[in-house]
Image: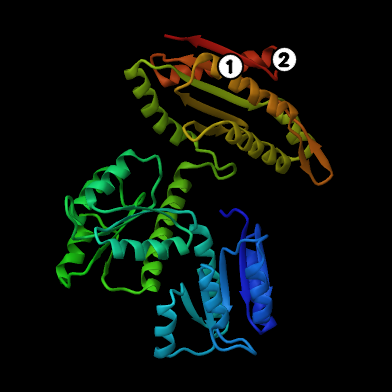
Amino acid sequence: MYSKKTILIVDDDSLIISILKDKIERKIKNINILTALSYKEAIKHILDKTQNIDVAILDLNLPEVESGAVVDYAMKKNIPTIVLTATINESLKKILIKNNIIDYILKNGKRGIDHAVDCALRILKHQGTNILLVDDAIVDLTLISDVLKKMKFNVITAKNGLEAYGILQNSDVKFSLVITDYNMPKMDGMTLILKIREDFDKDELAIIALSGYEDEELSSHLISVGANDFLTKPYSDIELITRISSNLELLDLFQKTKDMANKDFLTGAFNRRYFFDQGEIIFNKAKKQKKDLVVAMFDIDKFKNINDTYGHDVGDIAIVEVANILNKYLDESALMARFGGEEFCVLLDDITLDEAKILFENIRKAFEKNIIDINDLKIQFTTSIGICYGVFDTLDIMIKKADDGLYTCKNNGRNQIAMYTESR
């Protein structure tokens, strides 16, 4: 879920630091946690140019410095900051909101600690998310963009709906969220939302609509045409960040639900049903355009020996390794699925016959050289690969030809490629 990230935790109570650190490490294994009990220690971490702090959980009141000093310093360095405080009042809320704090959390036992951890993990998970920001008011566009960049989102801006729609149509960037003003020239927010929903469902691209109009019906109207959420101007940075986080969390939940239906639990590869659903679409498009395809069938040579010698747990690790190696050599356009047991199927388009031969020979060699270290064991295995190249009458026929090639490899000694071609 996360690449190597760094969290700074600052509190004069070592027990709170210990609890926060333990809870974070339980949820993320690949994490770098810096801790400080004082303002001086915290500043030393922040100024250390050898490390980049991705998010900070900071105690508002530290000894020997005025309240909020470490928070002010972290914000000046553009570190996304969550504030821990023992007490909260309206005056303090206004100060924290004004200073672009992500969230302020009461240190009220387990509930407050859990809230701080969850908030920090959400920030880490969503950093690097691509957001399209649309507003014709340059001041608003700049202010919101600055807030989002401090949160380490990737932000692309547009000055009206027409420009924004062009970006969505022509950019290679995969956006997760569009934040759009309602009242704009050339194409307003309402029309933009309608156009976006012609191409993207709510579960793949979220939209937050903004407006300064105090029209009670406007928010419901915008949501009814396809917005996921609505904010009335003016709003605080905390409110905006909270809404963004909530919508990105919903997208994550939608994706998890899709993955449960479409992916193999053990390997994370697509399952057989999804392969046929999407494969038919790819196949029909290629056949219509008279373009060649590759279907390749893989399986592990002498897999039964691995299970019999080392047990099924090691066999499962070998199966996962197949998916891992295939993912290293295949790009995102490849459709790769576990068909069952140790057998995998790959569908590729936009590839020449020579390119296919080189690709699959490199994959075969990668398996041949690969060593899996499992405690004191070193496991090696090879694969056989049956390949069908061209466009035949049906996808099923291509899979059958690739499968025939796989059995040819087995009969001829394994650890090899067999290719059947009918190139146009």
Q: Label 1 is placed on what type of residue?
A: Lys
Horizontal side of residue 157 vs 271, given as left or right:
left
Residue 373 in picture, x, y percent from top left: 78, 41
- Residue 168 visible, this orientation: yes
Check the image and name the residue furthest to the right.
376
Residue 401 in picture, x, y percent from top left: 51, 15
Q: Label 2 is placed on what type of residue?
A: Gly
Horizontal side of residue 29 vs 132, given as left or right:
right
The residue where tag 1 is placed is 357
Mark 1: secondary structure: helix
How packed mark 2 is, by other alpha carbons closer than 10 Å (few <14, some 14-19, many 20 or more), is few
Horizontal side of residue 193 vs 350, given as left or right:
left
Find out whether the residues at labels 2 and 1 contact each other: C-beta distance under 8 Å.
no
Mark 2 and mark 1: Cα distance apart in space: 19 Å
Instruction: Give the mark, 2 or 1, whose residue is nearer the N terminus.
Output: 1
How packed mark 1 is, by other alpha carbons closer than 10 Å (few <14, some 14-19, many 20 or more), is some
Q: Nearer the viewer, residue 304 or 266?
A: 266
Residue 271 in picture, x, y percent from top left: 50, 37
Residue sitting at x 26%, y 71%: 233
Residue 413: mark: 2
Mark 2: secondary structure: loop
Quarter of the view holding residue 322 = top right
Q: Quadrant of the C terminus?
A: top left
- Residue 245 visible, this orientation: no
Horizontal side of residue 268 vs 42, given as left or right:
left
